[in-house]
Image: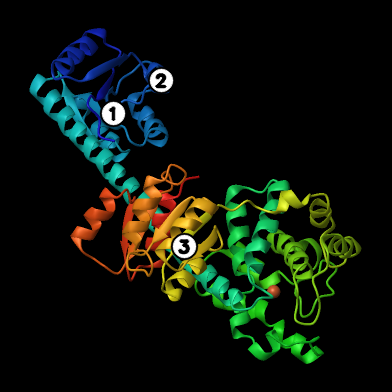
């Protein structure tokens, strides 16, 4: 950041010269520190970094010429002005070659000292501004990269959520796998970055099933070996698809290795034991547990106890013993994440499905198809946020919003109007009725996510 006050260090063994320079520079508003030799200069730098050093060449002990590389190496931002006698001009040139900013000659002349110091300070101020600008730019680039990554991964997981939701047998599978995997990851003491990747990898682990023959996926019976081989192409297809879009090794590894068996007995697996990436070994346990405890077209769900017995039996075979044992030691409460509810009130089914797909991994999305249902559902379910259409049968959204805001049991729930009507009057009206926000259709997934994040009460 550019500074209000700049500091000048005066290094000269002659006290009279030091005081003279100090007086000149303090009159110009600079803070000054004095040092009588190289050693004192370095000690002064330990406590405060001077912006400019006025450095005498002839010093007792280490000379100014020797001190320059030392200062530049450790304090590259400081500008050095060499103060030298006229007959030492060749030395001054050597100093410039070693990285000094400029030189002035003795006996010192007030105008020369001030103008040279001023130039150095301006250069220093400019350097600070450029650095500040670069830092700001880097932060923005990082923020934008994070935003792009978040919206891309969000869109992919919304897609896999929507695909799973089509099928009663797999609905919510990836989200539950993510819950279990993250719960295990926390017990393992993973970092927040690793937990984030674990969650995304879990949400996306099966997304390449889009490419798998639907008749086989939904087959009402056990798969033949050929069919099983076909289904098991999804990890490698998924990893290849994801690699061209996501530059995150851990997420890609989860997709690629989530079916690998710890003892190497899985189909076409390329890594065994601890060579299988840790996050993929975690997802393997979570994925298998959720598959076992879900109904399938050809079998009923196993009970929790039965599924745990299978996991126990596969410790060291299909599953990493350390991860499986952590999972076996966890209670049901440990692995089920409490999800807050949000309500979408819209008579258009496509909008309800869209909201469910985009937000369903993070919230329990409850639905109402008209304004009356919205008011009743708000009262009964107590969601943390309501997304409300305006034009709806039975009761319009503005009336429903008014009733929700007038009821002491529901008045604190934020209502965001989600409408195709883009009129200033409706915006004003909804605001006066107590709505927290107003989104017009068509909206992007990111608009919705941003609004929910902004207004949802936790
Ligand atoms: Fe899978």
Say how the picture is coloured. rainbow
Q: What element carries label 1?
A: loop
Mark 1 or mark 3: whose residue is earlier in sequence:
1
When the figure is inspected, residue 135 is found, relative to residue 449, above or below; the finding is above
Kindly state the secondary structure of the residue where label 2 is placed: helix
Residue 212 drawn at (x, y percent): 64, 86
Disc 3 element: helix
In this figure, which residue is indicated by the disc labeled 2? 47
Q: Where is residue 345 in the image (x, y as percent from the top left)?
A: 43, 64
Cα separation between marks 2 and 1: 13 Å
Q: Residue furthest top?
A: 16
Q: Name the residue under label 3.
A: 373
Give the quadrant of residue 412: top left
Q: 71 and 281: which one is in front?
A: 281
Query: In whole angstroms, how far apart are the C-alphas of marks 1 and 3?
Result: 68 Å
In front: mark 1 or mark 3?
A: 3
Question: Which disc, if any, is residue 167?
Answer: none
């Amino acid at each position: 950041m550019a500074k209000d006050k700049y500091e000048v260090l005066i290094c000269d063994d002659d006290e009279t010269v030091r005081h003279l320079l100090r007086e000149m520079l303090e009159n110009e508003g600079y803070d000054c520190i004095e040092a009588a030799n190289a050693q004192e200069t370095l000690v002064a730098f330990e406590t405060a970094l001077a912006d400019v050093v006025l450095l005498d060449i002839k010093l007792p002990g280490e000379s100014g010429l020797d001190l320059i590389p030392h200062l530049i190496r450790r304090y590259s931002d400081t500008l050095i002005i060499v103060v030298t006698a006229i007959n030492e001009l060749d030395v001054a040139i050597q100093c410039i070659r070693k990285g000094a900013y400029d030189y002035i000659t003795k006996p010192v002349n007030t105008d020369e000292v001030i103008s040279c110091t001023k130039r150095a300070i301006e250069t220093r101020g400019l350097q600070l501004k450029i650095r500040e600008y670069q830092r700001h730019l880097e932060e923005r680039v990082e923020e934008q990269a994070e935003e792009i990554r978040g919206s891309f991964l969000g869109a992919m997981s919304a897609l896999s959520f929507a695909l799973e939701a089509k099928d009663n047998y797999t609905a919510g599978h990836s989200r539950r796998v993510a819950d279990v995997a993250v719960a295990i990851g926390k017990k393992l003491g993973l970092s927040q970055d690793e937990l984030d990747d674990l969650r995304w990898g879990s949400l996306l682990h099966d997304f390449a099933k889009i490419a798998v023959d639907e008749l086989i996926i939904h087959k009402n019976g056990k798969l033949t070996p050929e069919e099983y081989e076909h289904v098991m192409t999804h990890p490698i297809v998924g990893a290849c698809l994801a690699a061209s879009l996501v530059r995150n090794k851990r997420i890609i590894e989860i997709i690629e290795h989530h079916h690998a068996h710890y003892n190497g007995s899985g189909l076409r697996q390329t890594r065994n034991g601890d060579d299988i990436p840790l996050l993929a070994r975690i997802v393997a346990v979570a994925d298998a547990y959720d598959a076992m405890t879900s109904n399938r077209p050809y079998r009923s769900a196993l009970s929790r106890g039965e599924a745990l017995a299978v996991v126990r039996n596969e410790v060291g075979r299909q599953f990493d013993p350390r991860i499986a044992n952590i999972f076996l030691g966890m209670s049901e409460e440990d692995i089920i994440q409490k999800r807050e509810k949000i309500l979408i009130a819209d008579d258009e089914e496509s909008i309800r499905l869209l909201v469910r797909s985009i937000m369903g991994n993070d919230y329990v999305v409850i639905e109402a198809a008209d304004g009356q249902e919205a008011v009743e559902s708000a009262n009964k379910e107590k969601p943390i946020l309501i997304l409300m259409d305006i034009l709806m049968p039975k009761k319009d959204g503005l009336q429903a919003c008014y009733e929700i805001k007038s009821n002491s049991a529901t008045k604190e729930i934020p209502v965001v109007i989600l409408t195709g009507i883009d009129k200033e009057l409706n915006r004003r009206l909804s605001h006066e009725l107590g709505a927290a926000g107003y989104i017009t259709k068509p909206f992007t997934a990111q608009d919705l996510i941003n609004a929910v994040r902004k207004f949802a009460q936790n």
